[in-house]
Image (cartoon, grey):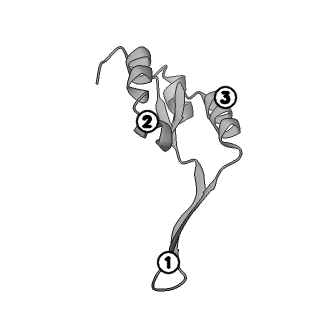
C-alpha cells in the first residue's frame, strides 16, 4: 500500500508496533509477570518504510504520547 500511495502522490501516516512480544505469565497465585521485548531495530524499520515511500512512520507508543499532538498538528495542518 505504501508504494501504491507514493506512486499516486498520496501522503501516508504509518504506525508500527515496537515490540516483538508482549505477554502475561502467572508463576503463582501471587505473582503476575508482564513482559515486553522491545525491537532494537525500530529506527531501521522506519527508514525502510520511508524508503518505500511512507510519508511518516510512528510507533504506537509515540501515538499515545501527549507530545504527539504537536507532531500531528505540524505535519497535518489539522488540529486534534
Q: What residue is rendered at 49% in x and 19% in y? A: 9
Secondary structure type for disc 3: helix
Q: Is residue 73 left or right of residue 57?
A: left
Q: Residues within 10 Å of mark 3 (few under 14, many from 20)?
A: few
Secondary structure type for disc 2: loop
- What residue would you read off at disc 2? 65
- What residue would you read off at disc 1? 31
Residue 72 has which mark? none
Q: Residues within 10 Å of mark 1 (few under 14, many from 20)?
A: few
- What residue would you read off at disc 3? 51
Q: CA distance from mark 1 to mark 3?
A: 44 Å
- Residue furthest to the left in view is 80
Q: Nearer the viewer, mark 3 or mark 2?
A: 2
Quarter of the rendering containing residue 22: bottom right
x then y, percent, for residue 12 = 47, 28
x then y, percent, for residue 38 = 63, 52
Q: What residue is rendered at 66% in x and 50% in y? A: 39
x then y, percent, for residue 4 = 52, 32
Q: Nearer the viewer, mark 1 or mark 3?
A: 1
Q: Nearer the viewer, residue 77 or 6?
A: 77
Vertical arrangement, residue 1 with respect to residue 23, above or below? above
Q: CA distance from mark 3 to mark 2?
A: 25 Å
Instruction: Report the quarter where the C terminus lies.
Output: top left
Quarter of the rendering containing residue 65: top left
Q: Earlier in the sequence, mark 1 or mark 3?
A: 1
Q: Is residue 40 left or right of residue 55?
A: right
Amino acid at each position: 500500500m505504501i508504494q501504491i500511495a507514493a506512486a499516486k502522490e498520496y501522503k501516508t501516516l504509518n504506525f508500527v508496533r515496537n515490540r516483538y512480544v508482549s505477554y502475561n505469565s502467572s508463576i503463582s497465585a501471587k505473582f503476575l509477570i508482564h513482559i515486553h521485548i522491545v525491537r532494537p531495530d525500530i529506527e531501521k524499520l522506519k527508514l525502510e518504510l520511508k524508503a518505500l515511500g511512507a510519508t511518516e512512520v510512528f510507533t504506537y507508543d509515540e501515538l499515545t504520547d501527549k507530545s504527539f499532538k504537536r507532531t500531528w498538528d505540524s505535519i497535518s495542518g489539522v488540529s486534534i
